[in-house]
Image (cartoon, rainbow, N blue to C red):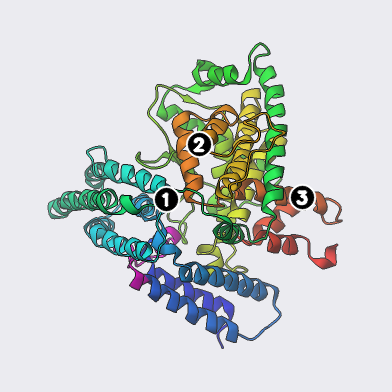
Amino acid sequence: MTNVFALADQFVEGIAGLQPVLATQMGVEGHNDRWGDLSPAGWQATLSFLNGISDRLNDLPDTGDHWEVLGRRVLREYLSLEQERILRSDPFSDLNNIASPPQVLRDTFDLMPKETAKQWAHIVARLEGLGAAFWGYIVSLEEGRRNNRPVAKRQVEACLKQCKWHASNQSFFNDLPLQASNADVASALMDRIIAGIDGAKAAYRHLGEYLEADYLSSAAAKDAVGLERYQFEARRYLGADIDLETTYRWGWEEVRQTLEEMRNVGRKIDPTLQIPEVVLLLKKDLRYVAVSKEAFLETMRERQRHALLQLDSKVFDIPPEIHEVDVQFAPSGGALGAYYNPPSEDFSRKGTVWYVKQERPSYPLFDEITTGYHEGFPGHHLQCGVQLCLGDRLTRAHRLAIWNEGYGEGWALYAERLMGELGFLDRPEYLFGLLASQMMRACRVVIDIGMHLDLAIPLDTLFHPGESWTFETAVALLTDYALLDPVYAQSEVTRYLGFPAQAITYKIGEQRILDLRAEAEQQEWFTLKAFHGRVLSSGPVGLDHLRELVLPAKDC
């Protein structure tokens, strides 16, 4: 009789066939030459598949085994949310500046291996198929328009700008022939690569023309999604129900406390300077910057290596499969920031931290050291790597396909704070960078909830007290308090407006983990290493579920 581990294997193989982009992200072989069907018919096929898996899951006998119970609950919750998301027609308004098909399809090329002619043949197939994939996507967007689910104008304009970039001579695609030449591909295949690049750029050009000429005129003027949609997204990303207005007030208190800490640390850097002047010093003074891209990347890589060597077996048990993490610059043209891609299922593809950077004469380090710990080790790289290594405990679906933002981003932000606690942020400017990171995540809470729910800025704040939120006000909070460059701040606020409730997961998730740790410290079993082991061995779960796993009733 099938158990949940076997059913989860079948789920992974089935969803990989329906969504080849997800297969590439998971590192599941056999699907790297296709995009899948992004049209309403494709989503209906996915829904039918999820319904079938759900029915079979409900028919499984209850064995009482801890890991089977975990696997069943995690898969059931994932299926329920994905089914609801499709039934709500969310895929038909899936357009934003950071995590929708225009970005995801482009980013997929970064994950594809490029060492052999066969692998380049897969890349060619996807280059050639990009136009058809976007055709299906356009059909879905049209379905959303017909059902009165228009995307906000700001998101359409941001994606239109990205499409123009990817269709231009500055496009990432123009770099592919040089990469292919390093793999010594045959001339006939190289000809197909060059032609495929033209086709891929034309696909982005066509998508941009559709957005500009057809879609933009019917785009929604309002950015906010409102209470009902926001509550759904918050529950989906957090795995917990929260009081949004209470969380909004808590976010403002975090902003206030973090600002005071930043002032204190800023005085240690230069007691004569105010915070904006400290930031200018850290961005311009050669003592605090990397003077080239190469120097920046090497600094980040060395920090990763050093942290792993120092903490392995002391604060974490680190599987040997993930003792390497790469650090790279991502191609231009997307939202600014940094992100992480996990290893493939067989670890043939290393976990990679990607920095999306503007061209500049030097690269400040003060806030990037902590970002490296967030995205790499001991943040997402440790988290994702550990779950991949738990094949004897976690189902294949849990290890590869299922993710919870509150758990995942909460852990990564906790990892930043932990590295400060352990002394790895060993210079005042690096501690200042940690606080700037915390400030940005606190600002995300108040901007995201405040703008989507149309809440007033509290009267007891020093920042625009009692006023309503605007895009410009949100940008000002990020530039004045979180110290972001204006262009980055604009990209961030656009992201929050198009990706509702995701931005709050970092700070809320971190606080839940800190609260769990405080409770766990009262237990006989507690050591820092044991606590981390319990959190990481759970795999990605909702925040309410995480508490049950780390502090089961028998321990309390």
Mark toward the viewer: 3 or 1: 1
Element assignment for label 1: loop
Q: Do the residues labelled 3 and 2 touch (CB within 8 Å)?
A: no
Residue at the location (72% across, 36% down)?
A: 421
- Does the magenta portion include 32? yes
Residue at the location (74% across, 47% down)?
A: 514
Marks 3 and 1, how far apart at CA:
37 Å
Residue beneath disc 3: 515
Residues packed near mark 2 inside 10 Å, few (<14), some (14 to 19) or many (20 plus): some
Q: Position of residue 431 (x, y in %)?
A: 65, 29
Q: In this view, does 54 lie above or below 255?
A: below
Mark toward the viewer: 3 or 2: 3
| First along the sequence among labels 2 and 1 | 1
The answer to whether any part of residue 295 appears in the image is yes
Residue beneath disc 2: 301
Looking at the rendering, the stretch of residues picked out in magenta corresponds to: 22-42
